[in-house]
Image: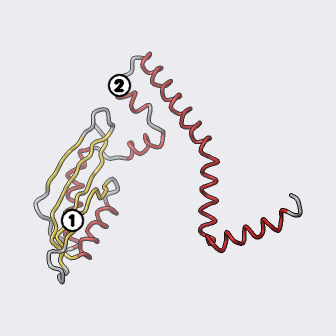
């Protein structure tokens, strides 16, 4: 690097550090690194798609059923996740765990609304349970936390909260939990 260029580079770096701060400089560096890696990620994505199509062609020649094609296109990590999901026969025990969590948190669950979704070709089932709750924030929070900690295949899909009385501590909430299961 030419010696005349060095003082200018030092001044520019000092100005950038003053204007952006350390966090801003790190952010700019990360964006530049992401831009530099973008062509590589696009290439890897394209080759993964080509390999997936090749696997589908081979399976089609072997006469495997269509659901096997969908599972073969999934990455190994996704297949391991599907294997970790419990069967739908565990649903009753999971609902009991949800009711136990409510009792432990001091939450009274209203009449539940239950739905079971099975997308065609998807390797899993999604069971949703929606409950109206009329409790304080601390009880509601501990109920949801207990369910998520003790039912690993559960997710908080939605929680609508309103406070009917501006000065009150009781909330009207609707909690929708989603449980994932392996297809039989």
Q: CA distance from mark 2 to mark 1?
A: 40 Å
Q: Which mark is residue 100?
A: 1
Mark 2, secondary structure of its residue = helix
Compared to residue 53, the image places residue 138 above or below, namely below
* Nearest to N terminus: mark 2 or mark 1: 2
Q: Quadrant of residue 27?
A: bottom right
Q: Which of the pair 147/30 is nearer the observer?
A: 30
Left or right for 26, reference 74: right
* Picture disc at residue 66: 2
Give residue 79's position: percent from left, percent from top.
Answer: 43, 40
Residue at 17% of width from left, 61% of height from top?
Answer: 131
Q: Position of residue 132 (x, y in %)?
A: 15, 63
Residue at the image point whose x is 29% and y is 38% from the top: 183
- Its colouring scheme is secondary structure
Between 10 and 169, the one nearer to me in the picture: 10
For the C terminus, the quadrant is top left
């Amino acid at each position: 690097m030419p010696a005349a260029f060095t003082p200018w580079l030092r001044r520019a770096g000092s100005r950038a550090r003053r204007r952006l701060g350390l966090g801003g400089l790190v952010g700019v560096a990360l964006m530049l690194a992401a831009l530099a890696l973008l062509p590589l990620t696009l290439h890897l994505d394209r080759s993964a798609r080509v390999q997936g199509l090749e696997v589908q062609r081979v399976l089609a020649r072997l006469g495997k059923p269509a659901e096997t094609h969908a599972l073969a296109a999934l990455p190994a990590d996704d297949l391991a996740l599907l294997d970790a999901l419990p069967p739908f026969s565990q649903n009753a025990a999971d609902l009991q765990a949800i009711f136990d969590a409510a009792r432990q948190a001091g939450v009274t669950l209203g009449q539940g609304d239950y739905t079971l979704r099975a997308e065609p070709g998807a390797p899993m089932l999604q069971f949703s349970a929606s409950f109206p709750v009329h409790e304080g924030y601390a009880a509601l929070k501990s109920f949801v936390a207990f369910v998520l900690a003790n039912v690993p295949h559960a997710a908080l899909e939605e929680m609508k909260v309103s406070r009917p009385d501006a000065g009150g501590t009781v909330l009207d909430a609707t909690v929708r939990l989603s449980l994932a299961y392996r297809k039989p």
